[in-house]
């Protein structure tokens, strides 16, 4: 028989042994960013799409976005990143593909963007992924003031694009407002096993508290991740944005450290908004979760 003191001693010894192992695992976990849109001032080589919902000021853009972004990664200690396909280029992925061509598969992957109402979009998505397997996601936008892409997630054309993404094993990146959380939940349930990443904390300013309650409910569905990004959309007290701590604390508690993803700004935001969590949990949010989600 082992008495209580012996059990406690054994547990203490295990904790002492596990501590350094967990710390080492956290230190080895990469910092991964999924947020930066690639833009070029060279509109002759990389023209904006005729159906672009907006066009940025090219005078403020670099001709080649890759060197400044790599400098940003070095400055903030970011190990891996995804190039995000911006809306102004629509479904023309020339710039993102150019950035991938000039970088290592170990360090960079990318997202895609298609027009759900275009009946050819599912085929275009499949062709793009076949051409470039480093495309690991497709983005879908739907929130107040941006219904130009689709009216409802229940629309047949929206489900067709969603299904194609699922069949290809892609992550569905949802830039949605709180008022569309219920529709998103229905689509997620319709495709068991689909992987979903919600952008910018579910855009809390684009809905009311009752609608955002449905955004929190999405945490109950499997394989749904929440991105802690776009904090500067709702607060001005940079760099750490302490004013939104009550909000981020609740969001992190609902989704848990295994399904929260940091992206945008400094990865130190995760340290600030996850005080009290273990180093291992914070490392997951900084990049470990994306590494696992993308099998990277």
Image: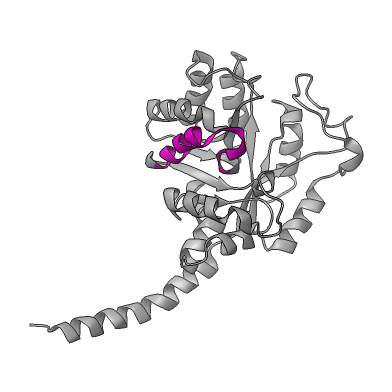
- Front-most of residues 8 and 81: 8
Q: Position of residue 60 (x, y in %)?
A: 89, 42
Q: Give x and y (percent) for residue 72.
A: 75, 57
- Residue located 76% across and 39% down the image: 98
Residue 229 relative to residue 36: left or right: left
**Would residue 142 be counted in the magenta stretch?**
no
For the residue pair 49 and 128, the one nearer the viewer reads as 49
Residue 205: image quadrant is top right
Of the pair 8 and 163, the residue shown nearer to us = 8
Magenta segment main secondary structure: helix
Q: Quadrant of residue 267?
A: bottom right
Relative depth, front residue between 96 and 248? 248
Q: How is the image coloured?
A: one colour
Q: Is residue 219 above or below residue 151?
A: below
181 left or right of 106 in image = left
x and y, in percent, of residue 64 in the image: 84, 44
In the image, the segment drawn in magenta is 201-219
């Amino acid at each position: 028989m082992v008495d209580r003191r012996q059990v406690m001693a054994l547990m203490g010894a295990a904790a002492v042994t596990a501590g350094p192992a967990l710390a080492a695992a956290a230190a080895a976990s990469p910092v991964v960013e999924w947020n930066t849109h690639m833009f070029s001032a060279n509109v002759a080589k990389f023209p904006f799409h005729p159906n672009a919902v907006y066009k940025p000021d090219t005078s403020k853009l670099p001709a080649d976005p890759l060197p400044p972004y790599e400098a940003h990664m070095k400055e903030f200690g970011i190990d891996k990143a995804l190039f995000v396909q911006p809306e102004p280029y629509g479904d023309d992925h020339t710039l993102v593909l150019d950035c991938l061509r000039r970088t290592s598969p170990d360090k960079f992957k990318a997202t895609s963007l298609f027009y759900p109402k275009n009946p050819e979009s599912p085929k275009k998505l499949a062709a793009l992924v076949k051409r470039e397997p480093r495309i690991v996601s497709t983005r879908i936008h739907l929130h107040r003031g941006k219904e130009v892409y689709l009216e409802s997630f229940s629309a047949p054309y929206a489900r067709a694009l969603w299904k194609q993404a699922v069949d290809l094993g892609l992550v569905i990146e949802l830039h949605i407002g709180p008022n569309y959380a219920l529709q998103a939940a229905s689509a997620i349930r319709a495709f068991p096993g689909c992987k979903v990443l919600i952008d910018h904390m579910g855009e809390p300013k684009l809905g009311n508290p009752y609608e955002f309650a449905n955004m929190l409910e999405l945490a109950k569905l499997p394989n749904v991740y929440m991105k802690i990004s776009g904090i500067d959309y709702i607060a001005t007290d940079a760099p750490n944005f302490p004013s939104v701590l009550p909000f981020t604390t609740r969001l992190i508690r609902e989704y848990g450290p295994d399904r929260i993803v940091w992206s945008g700004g400094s990865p130190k935001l995760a340290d600030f908004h996850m005080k009290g969590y273990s180093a291992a949990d914070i490392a997951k949010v900084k990049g470990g979760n994306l590494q696992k989600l993308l099998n990277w």
